Image (cartoon, grey):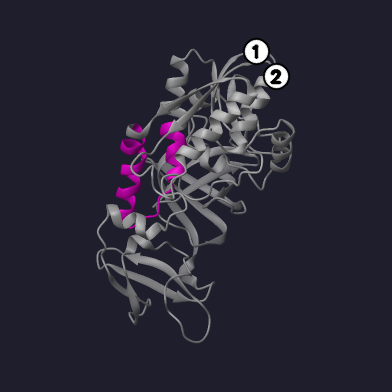
Amino acid sequence: MSSKKRVVVGMSGGVDSSVTAWLLKQQGHEVIGVFMQNWEDDNDDEYCSIKEDAADAIAVADIVGIDIEVVNFAKEYKDRVFKYFLDEYSAGRTPNPDVLCNAEIKFKAFLDYAMNLGAEVIATGHYARKVEQGGRHYLAKAVDDTKDQSYFLYRLNQSQLSRSWFPLGDIRKTEVRRMAEEAQLPNFGKKDSTGICFIGERPFREFLNRYLPRSPGPMVTPEGKVMGQHEGLMYHTIGQRKGLGIGGQGEPWFVAAKDIPNNKLIVVQGHDHPLLLKPELTAQQLSWTQDDAPQPGRYTAKTRYRQQDAACTLLAIEEGVCTVQFDEPQWAVTPGQSVVLYDHDICLGGGIIQ
């Protein structure tokens, strides 16, 4: 990052993107901030923090000494991310909208907007690193492995990576907060946002009810014994323990599968029930950070964020479907989530679990 560049920073009002803007300004780059408004259905809702976040981003920009624009990407978000989110839940799967938001909004709609502002690169507050070698751009894990977000960025391609910077990739989160406090940024102590951006902290079930019809049905064991009623398959995910309402003696109950044609939720007793352990998976909608698929062979993979990397073998990729075989069966592999492959610290890409 030695030569000075015109950089557009995606500013969310959070501490990470604020320190990103501050760091780049300190390094002498020409920095412009953009606050992305991706949701507008219920801005006045008690759970929606868009106005507060925008105010924080504007206050930070003022202190850092940069211009900032508030740009509305709500239409793109609804068309490209939210529609997919609802379609997946309707089909009984559990999508990860953060993955799609990065691929479609932050590194597509926002990237295009930034380039129209004359940006040479964009920067975000993601915890990930980019390594350049032989004219190729590699996505690598962050130094702070407790915060690494490469899992959410696996759908970025060479064109997107070549125009993106991740200044926090080499910095630990505790250090980022310290920098923010030292720079007197007003949000240095702001807690990290959790959950899906457009749902915020609101009850998930209540949110889905607005958009999808409830469809109650039986909760059954693999042998067919009815254990209770579910309010809708969409409210449940594989490996879920809380909120099933099945009491009684012995080990806790977990969601093991969904029988979608018959609207049945399959539940099992015991964390290590065989139905919760999968030795392999298949994935579609594949996306590779080097644009080309990696060779079949030995890698590690995550089937959910914050999971330890699991040793695996990537089998042949045929007709846009890959098969991943694990050395040790993986717990609660969930259709709709992403499997992401790694070669040591390098994120290779991945796909949507079937």
Displayed quadrant of residue 272:
bottom right
Q: Which mark is residue 4?
A: 1
Residue 218: x percent and y percent? Answer: 30, 74
Residue 276 higher or lower than 91, as above or below: below
Q: Earlier in the sequence, mark 1 or mark 2?
A: 1
Report whether residue 70 is seen.
yes
Badge 1 crowding class, 10 Å Cα cut-off, few under 14, some 14 to 19, many 20 or more, is few
- Residue type at tag 2: Gln
- Which secondary structure class fits the magenta region best? helix
Cα separation, mark 1 vs mark 2, equals 8 Å
Displayed quadrant of residue 90:
bottom left
- Residue type at tag 1: Lys
Residue 234 higher or lower than 185, as above or below: below
Residues at circles 1 and 2 in contact by the CB criterion of under 8 Å? yes
Q: Which residue is mark 2?
A: 27
- Element at badge 1? loop
Tell me, yes or no, whether the highlighted magenta stretch contains residue 146.
no
Residue 199: x percent and y percent? Answer: 42, 49
- Element at badge 2? loop
Write down the region rendered in magenta. 76-105
User: For this rendering, which residue is in front, 292 or 25?
Assistant: 25
Residue occupying image coordinates x 71% and y 30%: 183
